[in-house]
Image (cartoon, rainbow, N blue to C red):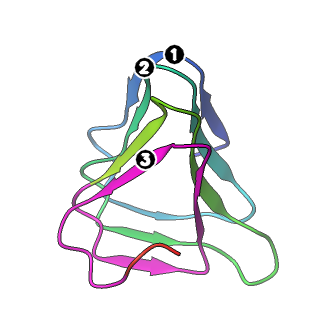
Amino acid sequence: LTDVLVYGGTVSFPQVYNVAVAGNSFIASGSDAVLDLSNLASITGSSDANTTITAQNAGGKVKLTSLEKATDVIFRELDDGDLLFGEIPFPVV
């Protein structure tokens, strides 16, 4: 995957299960903007470059309902955006 920015509508990656990325940004920003990564079980970033997953503005949603493992990834909810997790064992702060 490369940088992904969704401003409206839904963008989904149903066949992405595990990824290793470095310095990429995954952003859903704005009303009815949905980034669907609901089949993603594992994401590994890089300690040398910030990899971020951001839900921004009211209506911006990132679906991560199958995520079990995240390493070197920054999760952000900004301005009423929603990161939607399943049974993930750690909270987003």
Q: Which sits earlier in the primary sequence, circle 2 or circle 3? A: 2
**Closest to the observer: 30 or 71?**
30
Q: Of tags 1 and 3, which is closer to the observer?
A: 3
Q: Position of residue 47 (x, y in %)?
A: 74, 84
User: Which of the 4 quarters of the picture holds residue 21?
Assistant: bottom right
Q: Residue at x 46, y 72 (%)?
A: 92
Q: Which residue reaches farthest top?
A: 9
- Label 1–label 2 contact, CB within 8 A: yes
Q: Which sits earlier in the primary sequence, circle 1 or circle 2? A: 1
- Label 2–label 3 contact, CB within 8 A: no
Whether residue 87 is in magenta: the answer is yes
Residue where numbered disc 2 is placed? 32
Q: Residue at x 46, y 62 (%)?
A: 19
Residue where numbered disc 3 is placed? 82
- For label 1, count other residues whose C-alpha is less than 10 Å away and answer few (under 14), some (14-19) or many (20+): some
What amino acid type is highlighted by mark number 2?
A: Asp
How far apart marks 2 and 3 lie (CA) works out to: 11 Å
- For label 2, count other residues whose C-alpha is less than 10 Å away and answer few (under 14), some (14-19) or many (20+): some
How far apart marks 1 and 3 lie (CA) works out to: 14 Å
- For label 3, count other residues whose C-alpha is less than 10 Å away and answer few (under 14), some (14-19) or many (20+): many
User: Is disc 2 placed on a helix, strand or loop?
Assistant: loop
Q: Residue at x 36, y 37 (%)?
A: 13
User: Which of the 4 quarters of the picture holds residue 2?
Assistant: top right
Q: Position of residue 49 (x, y in %)?
A: 80, 71
Residue where numbered disc 1 is placed? 8
Q: Position of residue 76 (x, y in %)?
A: 59, 60
Q: Magenta segment, which residues? A: 65-90
Q: Which residue reaches farthest right?
A: 48
- Vertical side of 68 occupied by 56: above or below: above
